[in-house]
Image (cartoon, helix red, strand yellow):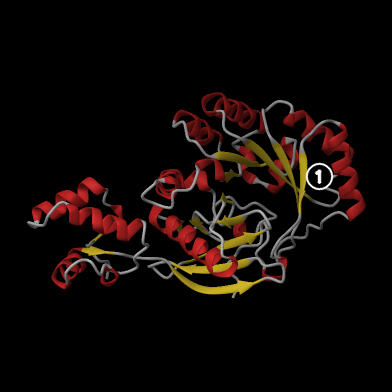
Amino acid sequence: MKSDKKNIRHLSLPQLQEYFGSIGEKAFRAKQVYEWLWLRHATSFDDMTNLSKDLRHKLEEHFVLPAVQVDATQHSNDGTIKSRFKLHDTHLVEGVLIPTDTRQTACVSSQVGCSLSCKFCATGYMARKRNLDFDEIYDEVALINKQAMEAYGKKLTNIVFMGMGEPLLNYRNVLQAIERITAPDGLGMSPKRITVSTAGVAKMIRQLGDDKVRFNLALSLHAANDKKRSEIMPINDTNSLKELIDALNYFYKATGNEISFEYILFDNFNDSKQDADELIKIYRQVPADLVNIIEYNPIDNAQFRKPDALKAEQFMEYLAKNRVNARLRRSRGKDIDAACGQLANKG
């Protein structure tokens, strides 16, 4: 039976103050509770030890606090940690901690499943069940930050929205989560350390520009002509490369934020000299800082293969010769299905 109690984290500080006023409590109680919710990551009202038992009981009668729980974790040989998170309605999503010598990066999910059906991505073969609420996304980040502290003694330095789902199809919750993640009374992270990756929703890329967001944007490109891109990414049928280029330029003009491209190399599909030339042409039409060339990671449902090392190296050399700032991104966490495109709640 669905509870009619309101999620307390969906109240702003002024709304909490109003609530405490209505029950005859001092206004400072609202600040205390707000700190428990966002700074101290309380998972129940019982955690709020500087409130009286009566007041905690009253909160429990009126509100719910549906915190995200770690359901399972897997540790890769390369130090990557994948977590399966259980939501209050028993749905599951995955998130990944990717450690390096200089960074601790959280890769987070924004939807349960995905509706875009990209042919190379395990999540694309799942149905989209629902969007994550902003507080659930925040919990993912807070829990991965805790893992980083416990495993490596370091806080998160970066967040990438490259997990399950299309962030721009959960626009309001993603932006609200980032507001809480970057707020001084939240996780206090710099928006410049956050990258939202999209498969390419032109209208919402423009909306990001209108909203003057402060985080970085990555476009999952993966093919540099419309015919090939539509073959592997059905979203391209309604969001052509020209529309996306125009939208990215609009976003950059409005915000000045970093733009990057993601490009998975598939053997004998998008790894020829002609493919490289088409990629170079797109790169020159957008003020992009970087092209991330990504190793393909095999999934159960797809027949793609990654090119051999020599072919990948030649592709990279050709881009460099044409003054493209490209980086080959090595896969992390492949042995636990935590690498790019592999998140699918296995097991």
Asked if residue 317 is positioned above or below residue 333 in the image, the reply reads: above
Q: Looking at the picture, how far across and down is residue 233, in whole percent? A: 66, 46
| Residue 33 in the figure: left or right of residue 166 | left
Q: Quadrant of the N terminus?
A: bottom left
Q: Residue at x 68, y 40 (%)?
A: 261
Is residue 131 visible in the rendered image? The answer is no
Q: Looking at the picture, how far across and down is residue 44, in whole percent? A: 30, 69
Q: Quadrant of residue 202?
A: top right
Find numbered disc 1 in the image and state the secondary structure of the residue it sits on: loop
| Residue 262 in the figure: left or right of residue 37 | right
Q: Looking at the picture, how far across and down is residue 281, in whole percent? A: 77, 28
| Residue 325 in the figure: left or right of residue 142 | right
Q: Quadrant of residue 334?
A: bottom right
Report the residue that reaches farthest toward the left. Answer: 24
Q: Looking at the picture, how far across and down is residue 92, in whole percent? A: 49, 67
Type of the residue with mark 1: Asn
Asked if residue 322 is positioned above or below residue 120 in the image, the reply reads: above
Q: Residue at x 81, y 44 (%)?
A: 270
* Foreground pick, 176 / 343: 176
Report the residue that reaches farthest toward the front. Answer: 153
Label 1 CA crowd tier, 10 Å (few <14, some 14–19, many 20+): many
Q: Quadrant of the C terminus?
A: bottom right
Q: Provide the residue designation for mark 1.
A: 270
Q: Residue at x 70, y 25 (%)?
A: 285
* Foreground pick, 117 / 80: 80
| Residue 300 in the figure: left or right of residue 65 | right
* Foreground pick, 97 / 85: 97
Is residue 178 visible in the rendered image? The answer is yes
